Image (spheres, coloured by chain):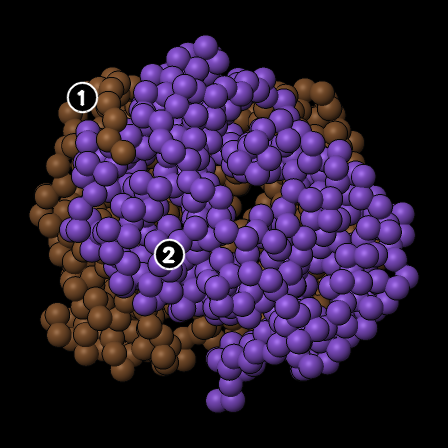
Amino acid sequence: MTGTSPPRPPLPKAQDGGLPAAHSTALDTGLRTTYVDLPGRDVAAVQLVFAGGGAHDPPGLQGLSHVLAHTLILASATRGQEEFALAVEGMGATFTAGCDPDGAHIDVVAPATCLVPALRLLAEAVTRPALDARPIRQVVDRHLVEIRRAAADPHHRAAQLFAAAVHPGRGHGRPAGGTTESINRLRPQHLQEFYDHRIGPQHAHLIVVGDLSATRIRQQVEQTFGAWRKPSHPPPPLTPAAAGAGRCLITHLPGAKQAALILGRTGPALPLGPRAGLEIAVHALGGWFGSRINRVLREERGHAYGVQGWLVSRPAARGRHQCTLQLRAATANPDLGHTARELIDTAAAAAGGDLTPADLRSAADHLIGVQGVRWEAARHLTEAYAHLVRKGYPPGFLQRRTTAIAAAIGPARPGIATFDPQHLRPERLTLAVAGDADIIHPALSAVGLAPETIEGNPP
Amino acid sequence: MRDRCTELELDNGVRAILAEDRTMPVVTVAVRYGAGARHESHSGQAHLLEHLMFQGSRQVAPGEHVRLVESLGGRTDARTSMDCTYYAQTLPRDGLELALWLEGERMGTFLDTAGQDRLDAQRKVVVNERLETIDNIPYGTAEELLLAHLFPPGHPYHHHPIGTRNGIETVSLDDLTAFFARFYTPRNAVVAVVGDFPTTAAATWAKKYLGQIPAATPPPPPPPEPAISATGGRRLDVTGRIPCKLFLGHRLAPAGTPAFDAARLTSVMLGHGRGGPLWRRLAHARDLVTDLRFRLTPLVGGASLGIAEITPRPGVTPAAVEEAYQEELTAFASDGCTDTDLRWATTRLESGWAARLETTGGRAEELTWHALLTGTAAHTGQILPRLREVTAADVRRCAAAWADPAERVVLTYQTRSP
């Protein structure tokens, strides 16, 4: 069909996605709270974040935070598993748990009309926990299966390999959920001791998002959590790994038909402005559809279904931000050599100043504008703030980050982000590849790389 | 639904649904075509066309559609299923006119620019998509294997919408343009605009950008599906370096029927959450499983798809779990469910529905699906009342049908010895 085709309408100006404001405060017990009011919403979301995650777990007992968080949502001291599940689900709520390297958390999604009773059940589970042997064993069984499944997933394997390589000997280099050996080592007393020592209002943060005006939510939170007075200790401090030289590493997945690749590094501790500049540059390289690498690898060559790229940072000394950047893709075995070369060469070109003002401006526009779309649902907005809290930032950092990105690309610096291209130099980047080593080792060697095959990763 | 919803039929037959909701400054523009894998003459045809639809039209360069949307802070989505293909973009509200223009532009002028070079790159992208989502991940092949054995050769649901490897590698540009010309016609499209916009402006732009496309003869209805016979309790085994897992494939009632509503409620009882009757038996009382899920895929052509996924506890064999599943399902079908269980399941469906409708994208997806299925988006508002009408007797009948081993396919992933 060929019809008439009206001319293209004017392109609207990209804008800040305009997130609803977050209000943070604290109970006198030390429990920090953040509220985001979304009037008229039918669904509310809550996340209770515990300071410290898999990276802070005691060596040898990795996965302790993960297992504890997942056990807490199953029952309470006054309700067994069946009764607790029926109470939660009978009101239409869901309780889930998670744990990343930086923080463990419990997530609640509930109909707006049931937000207060759902909060009461959350408080019951966390302040009067049932750390009995049976639910712990069930969580452990489930997690052992998941660890074995993940070991067969090339994306997970590449992520583990990359983390271990760029955080050598550090908590962030270990699997946040633990290994088969460490999980098998866990006993109920480990969980009880960990709960007694680490879990308490002074080291937790409650984020509540939804139609809050109807529920007088602050008063309800005080009533629900105000009696929780329990001493606790902060997670042990972690020393970031020094930035090392780049490597090319392989983890072997016999018979894999596609290889998963991660290229990146950790190391630079940057002030806010340069951090924003680096985030824009990584986004311009691989963070969105119009990124350099996606355009070449997917749109021109068809060598990947998609490319991702992002920067993660954590607060560091003297107001700086410890940054880790990564670019990800997966490619059919015959195209591996070319894909690896393309990833590295594109980063090298960026290190040489190849990213244009237009590249950087488009990437910044997307980073800023996408917030309103990406965090439309209460549960997504909750996670946006909780993600920062787990990394050690206050919720207000979200707005500071946005402002810094806008400033880095703003009229005062027309199109030139304030980042140092040297951060992307190829000799500083590590390439982690998960796939069939018998195929990918020669493929990587053929494009001038010197891959090392790492045995036994993970578990 | 809280939206103020207006339905229009444009002069050329495009059905447009305008659902205004000012709670967030975003808008979703979605188009659903009644053209899916079931309409193909060549495996992978519908899915590859979906990819090619982002490769430009008369005034849009290859890849520019997504770049324009994302540069405004939006995101795009596209999905090919058995019965239809769905395209959507969610973006800040100021992008509404651009989004409607982009959809009208490719509906009206796609054929002007479709070229072999664009197909060649996207063919490789789809091969990589297949590897990434099916062939190269644990249990990725489960749905494709179950479809192939639940539906006989020649049935439109016999093959997975992503396309076979051979199909992806051999489909021609002519195959794709012919598919487009036949099925991507205005009368075979439903458009939804959901979010923060004035309805009058959206209606004006919908007419301007979508209503001007020449009308075309609508595609003929697909031929009747071949009869489906009992599977005879077909069993499949796959061995790999992964934990054991069972997948039980069931054929359910077609979407939009009261029997499918009963299947929805039954599936919640059998495989959602931690308070359901089957979880209570298999996980709590008998301590045999670590995970149990039941997921439905609504389909219109004779039968829908239901898959139970069961993960045995370490040390428990798949055979023992399957035997227990059969015992408990038979008992459930015989004893029926309690009123408490029925209320629990209905509440879970209600809250899941609310979460589904929380985003403009979720609402656009449901509105276009129900409009295509029934002819009117207003049917979306009937979902909860219909589910509330399901009785314990309906659930019992449904469970009894699923409990018949001769009507299912059992797929077992076995752990390969080191």
Q: Residue A27's image quarter?
A: top right
Residue A412, disc: 1
Residue B67, disc: none
User: Whole-Å distance between the Cαs marked 2 and 1?
Assistant: 57 Å
Answer yes or no: is residue B156 visible.
yes
Residue type at mark 1 is Ala
- Crowding around mark 1 (Cα neighbors within 10 Å: few <14, some 14 to 19, many 20+) is few
User: Can you identify the residue that label 2 sits on?
Assistant: B41
Judge whether B44 appears above or below B370 on screen.
Answer: below
- List x then y, in percent, for residue A71: 70, 59
- List x then y, in percent, for residue B141: 48, 68
Chain identifier of the residue bearing label 1 in the image: A
Q: Is residue B59 left or right of residue A195?
A: left
- List x then y, in percent, for residue A327: 29, 54
Q: Which residue is drawn at 61% across and 41% down?
A: A47
Choose between B263 and A103: the one closer to the eye. B263
- List x then y, in percent, for residue B324: 77, 75
- Crowding around mark 2 (Cα neighbors within 10 Å: few <14, some 14 to 19, many 20+) is few
Answer yes or no: is residue A317 visible.
no
- For the N terminus of chain A, the image quarter is top left
Q: Residue A333's image quarter?
A: bottom left
Choose between A390 and B142: the one closer to the eye. B142
- Chain A color in figure: brown
Secondary structure state at the residue bearing disc 1: loop
The mark closer to the camera, 2 or 1, is: 2
